[in-house]
Image (spheres, grey):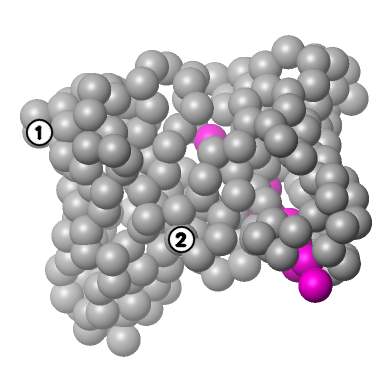
Amino acid sequence: GAGVSQTPSNKVTEKGKYVELRCDPISGHTALYWYRQSLGQGPEFLIYFQGTGAADDSGLPNDRFFAVRPEGSVSTLKIQRTERGDSAMYLCASSSRPWAEQFFGPGTRLTVL
Amino acid sequence: EDKVVQSPLSLVVHEGDTVTLNCSYEVTNFRSLLWYKQEKKAPTFLFMLTSSGIEKKSGRLSSILDKKELFSILNITATQTGDSAIYLCACIQGAQKLVFGQGTRLTINP
């Protein structure tokens, strides 16, 4: 595709529910990143995939957060037992090679009531 | 701990003014510094700076990196209302992730 796409654009859920956020990177980009951005802050790193494997998941806040990229393209960020503090904009980015510029998708705004 | 600090946090100027946005960093295994513009949702890539002292330019925007003093500036000349946005500075560090500053909110008044 022309750019990184993310679905849904908005997600409202209730505390305790499970959510999945999807990211479709730029075609041919092997590196994929997830970030979380709270209001008034810069994005914070969550996890980085090189191909199908998670090369660095040091930013995942706890074991309720999990991400997969089974075929090395589309990735899904999964959040179990959501809490109000998980409310944020979740951004996905991809790059064509290591340490190259990252291109961001439009984000999914998650609201946990 | 890796740290990227931007200043000012907020800036309001009139159309036609020139602005300078600042970014200082302390990042382990620093690789490159990037500038992004964020309007409503997705940060849009502006510049990637890897070498010290080499200015990168795109239209009215320019940026330069000083690896000795650990900072970068983003200049915007002849500002327009369409330049109103949050400008984010980020560093790529050894593990390939981006470490972001908190952003500068720039408002251009007509």
What residue is drawn where x is 42% and y is 67%? A88
At 80% from the left and 45% from the top, the residue drawn is B76
In the figure, is residue A104 to the left or right of B87? Answer: left
Q: Residue B4 at what x, y percent from top left?
A: 71, 42
Q: Type of residue at label 1? A: Pro
The percent position of residue B54, horizontal first and vertical second, equals: 79, 15
Specify whether residue B104 is painted magenta. yes
On residue A70, which mark appears? 1
Instruction: State the residue position of label 2.
Output: B41
Q: Out of B43 and B60, give the one closest to the viewer.
A: B60
Q: Is residue A113 above or below residue B75?
A: below
Residue A10, percent from left and from top? 29, 71
| Residue at x 52% of width, y 45% of height | B44
Mark 2 Cα-neighbour bin, 10 Å: few <14, some 14–19, many ≥20: some
Q: Main secondary structure of the magenta part?
A: strand
Q: Which residues are magenta?
A: B98-110
- Please state which amino acid type lies under the numbered disc 2: Lys
Name the quadrant containing residue A25. Answer: top left
Quarter residue A113 falls in:
bottom left
Q: Nearer the viewer, residue A40 or B53?
A: B53
Distance between the Cα atoms at labels 2 and 1?
A: 27 Å
